[in-house]
């Protein structure tokens, strides 16, 4: 694949690309700056929303708003008025963790994980499920950097990784209840393979993982078999996302590497189509 940087997307840490299929727009966050950006592909129109503190991830709501993971809480952002309303606090104030990767699931809930935000990188974080009423469940504990959330095309499987634990797991998911079962570790990629960062799923049910330590995208079969590795022009990719009118464009965000340079968003025609995003069923006005 031939990836091309999208002009005007420079960032400190570009993350969480989300394709809005109803608006024909790509959205992404700059985590440390606390901004969410939107680019309408057909017109080039752009919008930006600024929140205080880091933004770990976000997803689309059924009513057009955004469900946003901030440092310690999840809330809802109105894209027209820019009004923000807290929905659920997941971490205590001053916790050594912050919320990180999150995705709306096939169950209509927002799944979001935390990470140890200190240099020690201890297994003190968890994966949470937040429903439309703001109820919170802990779904997996003992994580260092929760990441790589993605849902199978039929909504009946969840994929999840730990970027510091260097593993990828697959669960059976009941989309009616959000219950998980059948936990299976399908891959353990190391530094040279590309530690697993953010991820997405394609229409064939294969899992695309950003290899943040190796400047690549890894495409895995549902059982964890590595099917392909795609090199990228950016050394530290953070998450892929399928988009475009036919879901055949692959967008990838990246961070500013320690060796210099800047984060950005790249795009390339994809060899396979993606899956339209699930939407959060918020019950708050």
Image (cartoon, rainbow, N blue to C red):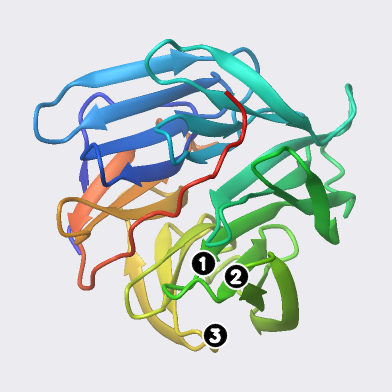
Q: Residues within 10 Å of mark 2 (few under 14, many from 20)?
A: many
State the count of labels.
Answer: 3
The location of residue 14, given as percent across then percent down, is 45, 35
Between circles 3 and 2, the one closer to the viewer is: 2
The Cα atoms of the two marked residues, 3 and 1, are separated by 15 Å
Residue at the (27%, 44%) spot, across then down: 266
Q: Residue visible at 42% across and 57% down? A: 215
Q: What kind of element bears circle 1?
A: strand
Labels 3, 1: front one: 1
Label 1 sits on residue:
151
> Residue at position x 88%, y 22% from top?
93
Q: Quadrant of residue 247?
A: bottom left
Mark 1 Cα-neighbour bin, 10 Å: few <14, some 14–19, many ≥20: many
Answer yes or no: is residue 144 visible.
no
Q: Percent position (x, y) of residue 33? A: 54, 18
Q: Quadrant of the N terminus?
A: bottom left
> Which numbered dot is residue 158?
2
Question: Tag 3, which secondary structure?
Answer: loop
Query: Could you give the CA–CA distance between mark 3 and mark 2, rounded to whole angstroms?
Result: 13 Å
Side (left or right) of 204 relative to 223: left
Q: Residue at x 23, y 48 (%)?
A: 267
Residue 25 lies, in percent from the top left, at: 25, 36
Determine whether 281 is above or below 161 in the image. Answer: above
Mark 2–mark 1 contact, CB under 8 Å? yes
Does residue 230 sit above or below 210 in this rendering? Answer: below
Residue lying at the far left of the rendered structure: 43
**What residue is shown with label 3?**
224
Disc 3 crowd rating (10 Å Cα; few below 14, some 14-19, many 20+) is: some
Who comes first in sequence, dot 3 or dot 1? 1
* Mark 2 to mark 1 CA distance (whole Å): 5 Å
């Amino acid at each position: 694949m031939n990836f091309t940087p999208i002009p005007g997307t420079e960032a400190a840490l570009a993350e969480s690309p989300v394709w809005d299929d109803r608006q024909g727009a790509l959205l992404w966050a700059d985590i440390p700056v606390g901004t969410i950006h939107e680019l309408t592909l057909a017109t080039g129109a752009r919008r930006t929303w600024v929140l205080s503190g880091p933004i770990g991830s976000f997803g689309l709501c059924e009513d057009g708003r955004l469900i946003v993971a901030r440092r310690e809480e999840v809330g809802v952002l109105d894209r027209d008025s820019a009004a923000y309303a807290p929905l659920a606090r997941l971490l205590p104030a001053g916790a050594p963790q912050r919320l990180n990767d999150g995705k709306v699931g096939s169950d209509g809930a927002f799944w979001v994980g935390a990470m140890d935000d200190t240099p020690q990188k201890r297994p003190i974080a968890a994966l949470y499920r937040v429903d439309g009423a703001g109820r919170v469940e802990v779904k997996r504990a003992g994580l260092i950097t929760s990441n790589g959330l993605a849902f199978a095309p039929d909504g009946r499987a969840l994929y999840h990784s730990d970027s510091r634990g260097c593993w990828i797991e697959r669960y059976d998911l009941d989309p009616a209840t959000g219950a998980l079962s059948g936990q299976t570790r399908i891959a353990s990629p190391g530094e040279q393979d590309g530690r697993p960062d953010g991820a997405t799923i394609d229409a064939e049910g294969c899992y695309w993982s950003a290899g943040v330590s190796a400047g690549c995208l890894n495409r895995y079969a549902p059982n964890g078999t590595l099917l392909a590795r795609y090199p990228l022009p950016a050394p530290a990719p953070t998450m892929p996302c399928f988009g475009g009118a036919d879901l055949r464009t692959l967008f990838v965000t990246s961070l500013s590497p320690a060796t210099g340079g800047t984060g950005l968003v790249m795009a390339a025609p994809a060899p396979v189509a993606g899956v339209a995003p699930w939407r959060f069923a918020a019950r708050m006005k």
